[in-house]
Image (tube, rainbow, N blue to C red):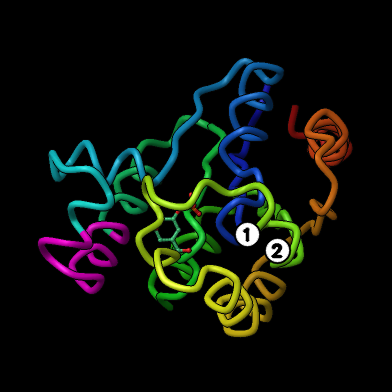
């Protein structure tokens, strides 16, 4: 049984949702995605929030979503959207939650090959390659500082990543 939550962090397209869902099945615990909580709370798709209210409003909703997720103490697997780590308040909440923080680390050029442009990623509408590169430069140190475990997510082998995280959490005596 999982005793502490797992927070998956990393750039958009690094596999947080796919890995998170698979892990939650294996660990028999709930799965939560911050984008989904934001969207459900606002009653709008992520893209619509960006378009109607702007990024600062989205970021505020995102912080609220994270607080709400941690307010429920049930251990779970949490996919934290790529930009969650930008706000100091969010980084503090993640640290204070004593979760296992796992960074799915992949190069922008590999992410570019597999993300779907459009959907919930309005920041990548224009020049996704350069934007991802810029995000990586700005965020790398934040992901690294927060992470207990860094997993190379450049390949497409989701099962391998799930196994690494599962083994890590098991070795910590938490499952
Ligand atoms: C964002 C990542 C997206 C979504 C929004 C902003 C970011 O989530 O929250 O488009 O700033 O990196 P994913 O990481 O799930 O793609």
Quadrant of the frame with the C terminus: top right
52 is higher (above) or lower (below) than 19: below
Foreground: 144 or 112? 112
Q: Residue at x 62, y 15 (%)?
A: 28
Q: Look at the numbered disc 2 and give the secondary structure of its residue.
A: loop
Stretch of the chain drawn in magenta: 50-63
Image position, residue 136 (x, y; %): 64, 76
Residue under numbered circle 1: 10
Residue under numbered circle 2: 147
Image position, residue 168 (x, y; %): 85, 41
Q: Residue at x 79, y 56 (%)?
A: 149
Cα separation between marks 1 and 2: 10 Å
Foreground: 75 or 133? 133
Q: Residues within 10 Å of mark 2 (few under 14, many from 20)?
A: many
On residue 25, the disc is none
Q: Residue at x 45, y 65 (%)?
A: 124
94 is higher (above) or lower (below) than 153: below
Q: Residues within 10 Å of mark 1 (few under 14, many from 20)?
A: many
Of discs 1 and 2, which sits in the foreground? 1
- Residue 81 magenta-highlighted: no
| Secondary structure predominantly adopted by residues drawn in magenta | helix
Q: Residue at x 45, y 34 (%)?
A: 32
* Label 1 CB-ligand 1 distance < 8 A: yes
Q: Is residue 145 left or right of residue 37?
A: right
169 is higher (above) or lower (below) than 139: above
Q: Look at the numbered disc 1 and give the secondary structure of its residue.
A: loop
Q: Is residue 129 left or right of residue 86?
A: right
Foreground: 153 or 80? 153
28 is higher (above) or lower (below) than 49: above
Image position, residue 163 (x, y; %): 85, 31
Quarter of the image where one finds residue 101: bottom right
Q: Is residue 42 left or right of residue 111?
A: left
């Amino acid at each position: 049984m999982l005793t502490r939550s797992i927070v998956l962090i990393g750039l958009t397209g690094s596999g947080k949702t796919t890995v998170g869902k698979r892990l939650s099945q294996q660990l028999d615990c709930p799965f939560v995605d911050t984008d989904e909580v934001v969207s459900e709370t606002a009653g709008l798709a992520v893209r619509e929030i960006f378009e109607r209210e702007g990024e600062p409003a989205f970021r505020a909703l995102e912080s609220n979503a994270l607080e709400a997720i941690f307010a429920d103490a049930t251990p779970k697997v949490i996919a934290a959207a790529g930009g969650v780590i930008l706000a100091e308040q969010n980084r503090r909440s993640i640290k204070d939650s004593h979760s296992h923080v796992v960074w799915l680390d992949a190069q922008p050029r590999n992410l570019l090959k597999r993300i779907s442009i459009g959907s919930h990623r309005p920041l990548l509408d224009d020049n996704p390659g350069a934007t991802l590169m810029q995000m990586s430069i700005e965020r790398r140190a934040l992901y690294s500082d927060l992470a207990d475990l860094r997993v190379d997510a450049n390949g497409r082998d989701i099962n391998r990543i799930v196994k690494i995280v599962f083994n890590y959490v098991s070795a910590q005596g938490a499952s």
